[in-house]
Image (cartoon, grey):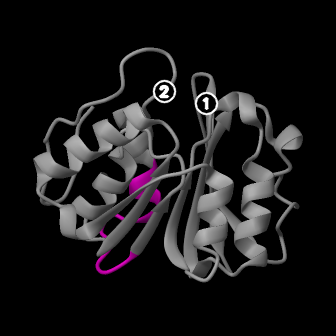
Amino acid sequence: MRIIAGKHKSRVLKTLEGMNTRPMTDRMKESIFNCIGPYFDDLTVLDLFGGSGALSLEAISRGCSHSIIVDNSRDAIRVINENVNSLKENDKVSIFTSDYKLALKKLANESFDIIFLDPPYRMNIVGEIVEYILDNKMINKDGYIICQFVRGNLEKLGVTDESFANDLVVKKNYSFGNSEVLIYQKK
């Protein structure tokens, strides 16, 4: 896994061993960032299920000013810290070891330009998280919410095109193997 563009282009990142995480492929990451970017001067990021921190670090490499990365796995937090330290971006990244619900409550008074939601597939919680984000005004106007989930699972997750039509527009919907990525933009 590597950084695709920006000041850290081609830098290799560590990832967690085993099957507990599924790092986003470079192809998926490039498609997402090309759709919403390519550069993000002074934007803020929330990465709610951080894994290795790769999505946040890609955004930082492309110009984001700050990212909050959340994960409840101590192993994931260790890898995130190693990646942040290797890029010397400690001043631009805040890392929280926390359950996503507690993190959302703690951050409910903050708003972001980009929010990454890539929970474990078995959880089926993307729709409820997007709803919480909207109810608490956590996404800025024209901001993006990027959701990854099991391909073909839109209805079950409550994230169909009509689900949040009053607040969000579907910018893009990609399928990559077993995964689907839905990119919402705040109206």
Side (left or right) of 72 relative to 92: right
Q: Nearer the viewer, residue 151 or 116?
A: 116
Disc 2 crowd, CA 10 A, few/some/many (<14, 14-19, 20+): some
Under tag 1, what secondary structure?
strand
Residue 35 magenta-highlighted: yes
- Quarter containing the C terminus: bottom right
Q: Nearer the viewer, residue 166 or 61?
A: 61
Disc 1 crowd, CA 10 A, few/some/many (<14, 14-19, 20+): some
- Quarter containing the N terminus: top left
Side (left or right) of 75 relative to 154: left
Boundaries of the magenta span: 32-43
- Find residue 29 and report its horizontal and vertical position in percent: 40, 43
Under tag 2, what secondary structure?
loop
What residue is drawn where x is 20% and y is 62%?
90
Asked whether residue 109 is in view, the answer is yes
Mark 2 or mark 1, which has the lower sequence index? 2
Label 2–label 1 contact, CB within 8 A: yes
Find residue 62 and name its label: none
Find residue 22 and name its label: 2
Side (left or right) of 82 relative to 36: left
- Find residue 125 and report its horizontal and vertical position in percent: 76, 45
Asked whether residue 151 is in view, the answer is no
Side (left or right) of 37 relative to 102: left
- Find residue 44 and report its horizontal and vertical position in percent: 41, 74
Q: Which residue is mark 1?
A: 179
Q: Nearer the viewer, residue 184 or 87?
A: 87
